[in-house]
Image (spheres, rainbow, N blue to C red):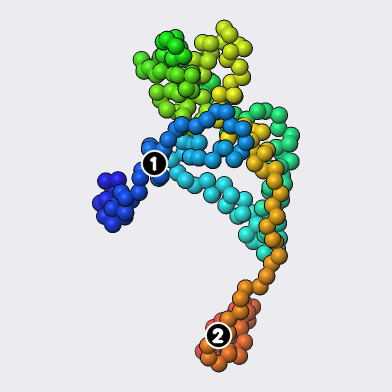
Amino acid sequence: MVELRNYDIDTYQWLLKIPPHHWDRSHFSYKYTLTVISVNELLGRAISDMLLNNLCEVFNSELVKGRDKPIIIYQIVPNEESLQCDEGVKQVSRPLIPTGTRILEANTTLASKYHARWNGGQNYQVKVPWNDQHVVDMGKRECSSRKWELNGIPCKHAIANLNEMTDNPEKVGELYTYGHKVYWLDTWKEMYSFKSDCPTTLVPPPHKKAIGRPKKKKRITAEERIEIQQRKSQANC
C-alpha cells in the first residue's frame, strides 16, 4: 500500500474506501463448510493461495493454438480441447483433481519429518525440525499456519497430526476427505456435466457507410508492392 500511495495517491484513496476483505487475500475469510451437498453451496471466496490472479492464462494458452486458423476453425479449437478434457476425466479413478493430488502428496512427504503431540480436546501441537511449532484443531479443521484454511488442503502440520492418529483408522478415514470439495474429482465432474447451449451462429459485423466519396483506388497486394519496389530500384548510369 505504501508503494501504491507513492505511485498514485488517487488510486490509493479510492482503494481505501473498499473493505479489504473484498480484494486483499490477507483479509479473506477462511471459514468454509466441509459438508457441501451440491455445487451451488461452493460459492464463496477462492480456495487458493496464489499471489497472482492470472488463471485466465490457462484458458488463453489453449486459444493460442488456433490463432492462425480461420475464424470458423478457430471456434472449434476450444470445443475440441473441452471434449478431450471430458474424455480424460472419465478415465481418472483418483479422488482428487491433479492440482489437489500434487499438493497433498508434497505435504505428505514433508509431514514425515514433523512430530505431533496431543494438546487436549481435539487440539494437537506439531513440532517441526527447526523448533517452530503450530497448533492444529481437528474439530474446526484449522491450523495456526493458516495454510489449511487458505487453500482448503490439509497442510503438512495437519497431515503429521493425522499420522499420529492412525492408531484409530476408522476415526481418521481417508486423507483426501479432509480437503475442500472444490478439489474433489466428483465435484468437477458435476460442474462440467452440463451442456453449453450458447448460440454459435456467426453473423457479420454491422456495416457503417464511411463519410465522403468512396475510394476507387485499387489496393496493392504484397506481390505488386514488391514489383513496384524492384521497378523503382532500377536506374541507368
Name the N-terminal-most of marks 1 and 2. 1
Task: Tell me residue 116's x, y (percent).
Answer: 45, 12
Residue 16 visible somewhere in the drawing: yes
Task: Tell me residue 233's x, y (percent).
Answer: 54, 83
Q: Residue 21 bears which disc, if any?
A: 1
Q: Amino acid at mark 1?
A: His
Task: Tell me residue 46's x, y (percent).
Answer: 49, 39
How packed mark 2 is, by other alpha carbons closer than 10 Å (few <14, some 14-19, many 20 or more), is few
226 vs 7, left or right, is right
Which quadrant, please, contains the N terminus? top left
- Quarter of the image where one finds residue 94: top right
For the point 51% across and 24% down, the residue is 154
How many numbered marks have been drawn onto this rendered protein structure? Answer: 2
Secondary element at tag 2: loop
For the point 43% across and 23% down, the residue is 143
94 vs 1, left or right, is right
Disc 1 versus disc 2: nearer the observer: 1
For the point 36% across and 18% down, the residue is 132
Residue 70 visible somewhere in the drawing: no
Q: Residue 226 bears which disc, if any?
A: none
Secondary element at tag 1: helix
Q: CA distance from mark 1 to mark 2?
A: 50 Å
Q: Residue 210 bears which disc, if any?
A: 2
